[in-house]
Image: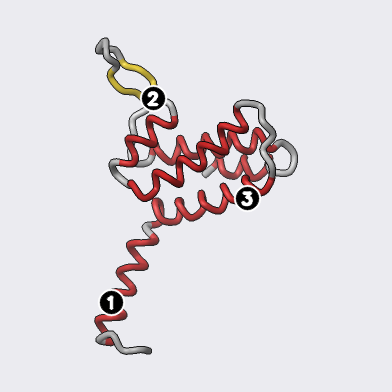
């Protein structure tokens, strides 16, 4: 994912920009399952959804990842609103983003669960 690569590049030189690139990465991630960028407003006209609104829509599909994306949104908020983003929260953000990408884009949980189910069935629940 291009935005994550750009975020890594900015880690040592510009922490706020690094955090903003993470936000763009979350936006791109939400495009993958086609989470809408707009909704119909009260007046019937389309209104843009902010990242929080898109995460709320996503929580209906993958509720276990909504909290992860919300945590990443918090890092982005610091970067966007001028507060200095320290390296430790950025490293934490990279780590949870990596985990989310592995699961959402690589179906890690599904593959892992399938492998463990097959192993238990084949061994009839007995060790090794």
Chain-order first, disc 3 or disc 1:
3
- Labelled pair 2, 3 in contact (Cβ < 8 Å): no
Residue toward you, 125 or 107: 125
Q: Earlier in the sequence, mark 2 or mark 1?
A: 2
Q: Which residue was labeled with disc 1? A: 118
Circle on res. 91: 3
Judging from the image, what secondary structure is the residue with disc 2 in?
Answer: loop
Viewport quadrant of the C terminus: bottom left
| Residue at the outermost top position | 43
Q: Which residue is mark 2?
A: 49
Spatial separation of the CA atoms under disc 3 and disc 1: 35 Å
Q: Residues within 10 Å of mark 1 (few under 14, many from 20)?
A: few
Percent x, y of residue 49:
39, 24
Q: Position of residue 38 (x, y in %)?
A: 34, 23
Q: Quadrant of residue 5?
A: top right
Q: CA separation, marks 2 and 3?
A: 27 Å
């Amino acid at each position: 994912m291009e935005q994550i690569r750009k975020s890594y590049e900015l880690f040592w030189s510009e922490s706020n920009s690094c955090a903003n690139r993470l936000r763009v990465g979350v936006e791109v991630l939400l495009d993958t399952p086609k989470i809408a960028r707009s909704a119909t407003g009260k007046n019937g006209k389309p209104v843009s959804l902010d990242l929080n609104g898109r995460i709320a829509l996503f929580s209906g599909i993958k509720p276990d990842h909504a909290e992860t994306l919300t945590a990443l949104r918090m890092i982005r908020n610091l970067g966007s609103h001028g507060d200095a983003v320290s390296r430790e929260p950025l490293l934490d953000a990279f780590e949870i983003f990596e985990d989310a990408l592995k699961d959402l884009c690589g179906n890690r949980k599904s593959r892992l669960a399938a492998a463990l189910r097959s192993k238990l069935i084949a061994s009839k629940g007995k060790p090794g």
